[in-house]
Image (cartoon, helix red, strand yellow):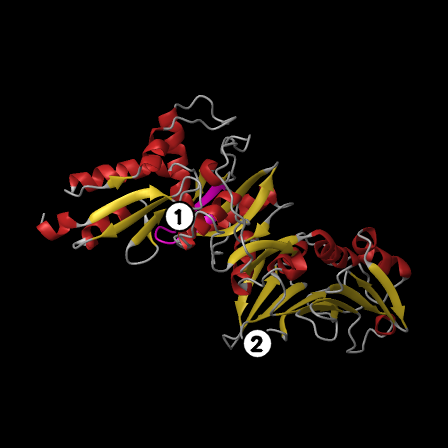
Amino acid sequence: MTTSSAAAHVRLDTHPTHTSAVTATITGPGQERARAVLTAHGFEALDDDTLIMARIDHEEPYWTEKAAQALTAERFTPEITPRLREAIDEEWTWANYPMPWCTRAEIREVSNEAQKIHDDIRHGRLIIHAHADDNGTTVAVGTYRDSGKSVYLHGENHLRQIADTFDSLAQALTSFERFHGDTMRPGAAPVTDSERAAAEARASLGTRDTEPEPPAHGPEMVPAYAADAGDHDAILDQFLAAHGDWEKWRTFSDDTTHAIHESQTLRIERIHETHPRETAWTVAAYETPVSDRMWHLTATGTTPAPVLQTLLQHLAEGDGWDTAIGSPVVEKTVTTATKPLTDAGWKHTIDGRWIRWTNPSGDAGIQFDAFAAQQPNSTLVTWTIWAGPSIDHPTWTVTASPYTPSSLLADLAEDLAHGTGTRQTNAAPRERGARLATTPAAVRPATASRTSGRTL
């Protein structure tokens, strides 16, 4: 070890504004080697001289001591402040820990494995395809980029574990939808308090008397109609991978993909490169493979991921033919389609031939055109589902023809009224301390199905 490397001074201290997080400040010559040791033990750089360890299990003092031992072995002399030494020596236990048979060392091992999963997700090594609620416990399905292995995750924060593995993404999604179809949502679950607090700690050192800086672009939970659009191509691929009765077809141009049900009577057209507010999806249903279409529906490229997921889920259930072609659109049809909005207390207005339901904030709604409903061969839109500043200047729209099934429309209305999703934001965070209470549910026995799916 060279003299310059040994000369670097490392000061380890508690984070000024975040309970349990730890800072490392390096001064003097030969800092590169000290920084490498700290990085290998869980610290992340804030700037050229400062690193921070912020974990979701609040075990930073324990792992900091391991880092200090590694620094000493490399001939550095780390300085541990008195308040950090007090935190290292403190004995504490998780209240109501759901695995009471574990020793303190085993609990720490479980939480460290959960930390590794969290870091893999955060750094993009583990891609989460969908999440769901399993009796109050968050579950998810994802795939590791390097190995291609798909996994079933159970729990959150320091209790998250890999409960099962799969040979293919198709198997994983098929099994996940089988067990959690009712609460399944695309993408990762909203960030938890512990995850948000760790992100805040890594983003800023702050001071002990001021609020920390907000993290850059953290996701927040919002109504489904205000959620991000997400990756529409990925959503279609996941849908096809999970439903072997649908087949993917490429057209002569790479700009468009068709997905066709095995009955040949339900079809999806996905246009990949289009203006965000122009039609990117068209769904059409046919009475027979060679007949004229019974009904069709379109969606723009900015349609939120949760709304699109609801649409595809309905198509997967095969309930696409509950409105007989040629039958009039009667009051019962309209009432059934909009009942979720009525039950939620959305504003109901009539303006000539248009009937509208609008949410209290006025930024989402459904419009029914009574005139267009009686003109089945017209190009006029019968149903318009929208969100944005106004129906005339929407952020996104879904439009539907007269004979679109009322059950499908009701599903979309239900999503508007009660569905949720995530949106990237710069929302100012609140300071949060360490929470030592835990989720009461332990990991259940692995029950994921091994039913083979179709690999694209």
> Pointers 2 and 1 in contact (CB under 8 A)?
no
Residue 145 lies in the magenta-colored region? yes
Between 111 and 244, the one nearer to me in the picture: 111
- In magenta, the rendered stretch is 142-153
Above or below: residue 324 compared with residue 372 = above
Above or below: residue 412 compared with residue 172 = below
Q: Which mark is residue 315?
A: none
**Tag 1 residue:** 119
Measuring from the top left, give residue 241's x and y in whole percent: 52, 55
Instruction: For mark 1, give the secondary structure.
Output: helix
Between 228 and 78, the one nearer to me in the picture: 78
**Tag 2 residue:** 274
Q: Name the residue rendered at 87%, 70% in the picture.
A: 370
Q: Residues within 10 Å of mark 1 (few under 14, many from 20)?
A: some
Direction from residue 265 to residue 101 in the image, left or right: left
Q: Which is more N-terminal, label 1 or label 2?
A: 1
In this view, the residue farthest toward the top is 101
